[in-house]
Image (spheres, rainbow, N blue to C red):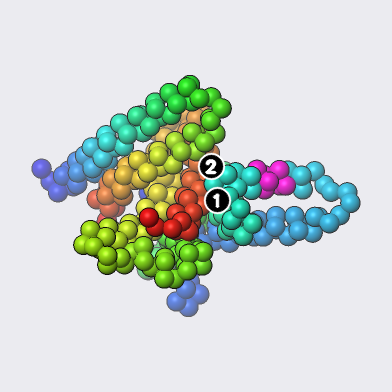
Amino acid sequence: MNKGPHISIRPETLFSIGNFHVTNTYFTSLIVIACFVAIAIFYRSQIGKEKKPLFFYLIHFIFSGIYNFFQTVVGEKITYLFTLLGSLFLYILLLNWFGLLPGVGSVLVRVKEGHEYVLAPLLRGNTTDLNTTLALALVAFTATQYYGFKLLGPKEYLGKFFNFSSPIAIFTGLLELVSEFSRIISFAFRLFGNIFAGEVILVIIAFLVPILVSFPFFLLEIFVGFIQAFVFAMLTAVFINLAATKAH
Amino acid sequence: MSPEAVKLLATALAIGLGVIGPGIGIGIIGGKAVEAMGRNPEAESTIRNTMILGIVFAESLAIFALVIAFILRFI
């Protein structure tokens, strides 16, 4: 019998509605989306008022910091790319940091698995589920293709990948096409791998030494969560920029 | 050796050998970035962003090794 800490890649199913399994990571993502939407509605409702609360200025400071940073990466395209890049960054940041809150992963509920009852965490950090990171990677990938087609035009954008002017051009075009699709895998697994590895480290350290020692690892995880959210949004920006530049 | 022992050994070797290359790469990237910042302190923010991008690309190789280790361990 394995007495060590319980680690599973697969999210645990809490309950099922028909064929749809509500997992603990999905439940967490609903809470985070509620927070995200609440912040957005709050910001929108206060924007025209004469006297604004202090919290508005905090959010405004964060938004303008993100705006100014991505402006240095994508230039004047920021006017229509900011909604995508800013929400990717903030959403992933909230997901990563929500997984570090006390109670997430430690509050257990009894769920039915097959014919027996097992204990499963009620909440679990959403980016430790490969489904979420894959979905986010597909959003980034689709946005890259969309802006490539829109900003360059279909003929020129497809000409980057299917170029029949010389044998070498055919080969490099195919390589470009493969690397375009491999980005989905590297996007998804980078976010998943970093955050899941962090959760595993926290569990193992808390299992070995129960008090105090896991504190520096929590600080490290806060930093890693920020960096991964930043990197995800920045890579999306860089790839959109690459897709929108002419081939030479 | 029993199959479980081989599996554990394979997991440890996959991640242990897999992070050697990215470790060296990230070290070189960080060192060169500090060197560049020392030569041209005004360009610090651009150098930092480029450095983070480079580190991320080097790190994604380590992530692939991690994925292999996960597959060996849990599936």
Query: Tag 1: residue type?
Result: Val
Decide whether residue A61 is among the magenta residues. yes
For label 1, the residue is: A74
Query: Could you tell me which residue is drawn at 27 percent across and 65 percent down?
Result: A165
Which region of the structure is painted magenta? A59-65
CB atoms at circles 2 and 1 under 8 Å apart? no
The mark found on residue A226 in the picture is 2
Q: Taking B17 as reference, is A55 left or right?
A: right
Query: Could you tell me which residue is drawn at 48 percent across and 64 percent down?
Result: A152
Q: Considering only vertical position in the picture, is A197 above or below A37?
A: above
Q: Mark 1 Cα within 10 Å, few/some/many (few <14, many 20+)?
A: some
Q: Nearer the viewer, residue A213 or A88?
A: A88
Tell me the SS state at disc 2: helix
Q: How far from the left and from the top, in percent, is residue A11?
A: 42, 58
Q: Residue lying farthest right?
A: A50
Tell me the SS state at disc 1: helix
Q: Residue lying farthest front?
A: A165
Query: Tag 2: residue type?
Result: Phe
Query: Could you tell me which residue is drawn at 30 percent across and 48 percent down?
Result: B64
The tag earlier along the polypeptide, 2 or 1, is: 1
Q: How far from the left and from the top, in percent, is residue A118?
A: 42, 59
